[in-house]
Structure formats: structure tokens, C-alpha cells
Amino acid sequence: MENNNQRIDYKRGKVERYLKKFKHRLRIRSIEKELSFPIGTIQKFTKKGRKIDDERILQLYTYLKKMRL
């Protein structure tokens, strides 16, 4: 269980750093639409610091890895 939490924390860190670094270059709405996220999920994270839940972090990690970003 602890090992799984470490993996999620690792992926969360990578995704959050990437989103913050490239928020001006990404088409955030397109990503949200493709992953079926509610509109504003990623935007609220990048602008207001709202936490993205673990399930969505894993989806974003897989998406970004697939896109090789």
C-alpha cells in the first residue's frame, strides 16, 4: 500500500511540475475534453492551486507519457 502511494506521489509531482511549467503552451481545454474531465479542472490547479485527485493525476500522467511531453 505504501509503495502504491509513493508511485502516485511520484507521478503527481511529475504531472504538477509539467502543468505549471508549460501551462501557457498547453491547450488545457483540449486535454480536459479528451480525458473527459470537468471543464476547469486543470485550469483551477494551475491558477488557484486546487488539488487534482489521484485518479485524474494517473490519467494525466498516462496521457502526457503517451504524448511524450
Image (tube, rainbow, N blue to C red):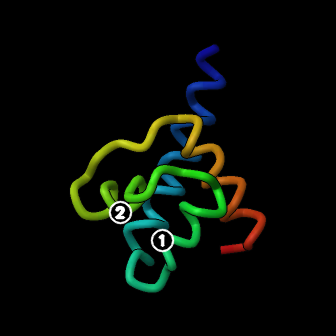
Q: Is residue 42 or residue 57 the one in the foreground?
A: 42
Circle 1 residues within 10 Å: few <14, some 14–19, many ≥20: some
Residue visible at 44% across and 77% down in the picture: 22
Quarter of the image for residue 42 reads bottom left
The answer to whether 38 is drawn above or below residue 63 in the figure is above
Quarter of the image for residue 48 reads bottom left
Q: In what quadrant of the picture does the C terminus appear?
A: bottom right
- Image-based side of 60 in relation to 9, left or right: right
Badge 1 marks a residue whose secondary structure is helix
Outermost residue, right side:
66
The amino acid type found where label 1 is placed reads Ile
- Image-based side of 1 in relation to 46, left or right: right
Which numbered dot is residue 37? Answer: none
Which numbered dot is residue 28? Answer: 1
Q: Which residue is mark 2?
A: 43
Q: Position of residue 6 (x, y in %)?
A: 57, 31
Residue visible at 58% across and 46% down in the picture: 11
The answer to whether 67 is drawn above or below residue 8 in the figure is below
Dots 2 and 1: beta carbons under 8 Å?
yes
Q: Position of residue 54 (x, y in %)?
A: 53, 35
- Image-based side of 68 in relation to 42, left or right: right
